[in-house]
Image: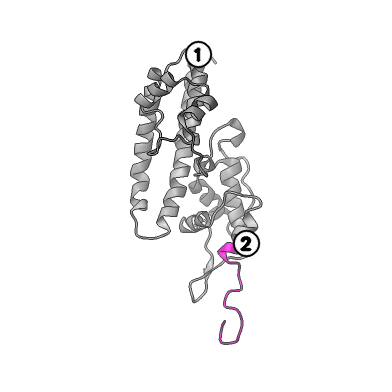
Amino acid sequence: MTAAGKPEREGLSIGAVLARLRPQFPDVTISKIRFLESEGLVCPARTPSGYRQFTLADVERLRFVLSAQRDHYLPLKVIKEQLDAADGAGPVRPPRGLVSVPVEHGLPTAAAFAEHAEIRMTQEELLERSGLDAATLAELEQYGLIRPGPAGFYDSLSATVATTVNSLARYGIEPRHLRAFRASAEREVGLLEQIVAPLYKHPDPDARGRAEEMVRELAALSVTLHTLLVKAGLRRVTGG
């Protein structure tokens, strides 16, 4: 309370902003909002006690950012440029006519790399779910394509890899052929690690949230580029 007996915070708290955004963006988190603030995409006021005070205009600005990321697959740098250009020109709206990667083309978004509640499967459950046999699974583990956890269980990501490998096997592609995929993925991960590792080591408690958001966005961009390069290469094969 202030000296006049009025509440110190009259704007929207970060929790209230989250509640307004969640119906449209179920994956948004407080860490995400803080990350967008740290990147200069929204600048809420602060009370003397340091609490954030968001306005309705701030909420619409966040809605614009989240829509541009999800629906237009734009990197934050481009979104910020759009926002900077729109400042002083009235309410911001989702961008039109921009060179972007449409989500409906099946390319990944940063949300695809968010951590979800994991399941644990035994080897028998993994084999039943994927259709692989034990010998093929042993090969995949030998080549580092699947790794059980410390307790010997497999997660949902391992199951998806196993199912994908089983589908490739129908075309004569064996686990030994997939070592190049693993090596390529490890090189990409190594590059991303160099970029985000300093943030994970930063003493700022919000830095880890920024690092997690950044690594998801970088991962999506990396996989998108890989997908587009494969598509371009296939044109030479098909003569398209």
Q: Which amino acid does label 1 sit on?
A: Tyr
Quarter of the image with the N terminus is bottom right
Asked if the residue at tag 1 contacts the one at tag 2, i.e. Cβ–Cβ closer than 8 Å, the answer is no
| The residue positioned farthest toward the bottom in the image shown | 3
Q: Where is residue 122 in the image (x, y as percent from the top left)?
A: 47, 32
**Residue 149 location, quadrant:** top left
Disc with the residue nearer the chain's start (2 vs 1): 2
Tag count:
2
> Is disc 2 placed on a helix, strand or loop?
helix
Q: What residue type is labelled 2?
A: Ala
- Say which of 72 and 4 sits in front: 4
Residue 171's disc is 1
- Magenta stretch prevailing secondary structure: loop
Q: Position of residue 179 (x, y in %)?
A: 37, 23
Give above or below for 10 relative to 121. Answer: below
Q: Name the residue under label 2.
A: 57
Q: Position of residue 3 (x, y in %)?
A: 56, 87
Residue at image location 50% in from the left, 35% down from the top: 156
> Is disc 1 placed on a helix, strand or loop?
loop
Is residue 11 at all visible to an observer of this figure? yes
> Magenta region: which residues?
1-15
Relative to 122, 98 lies left or right = right
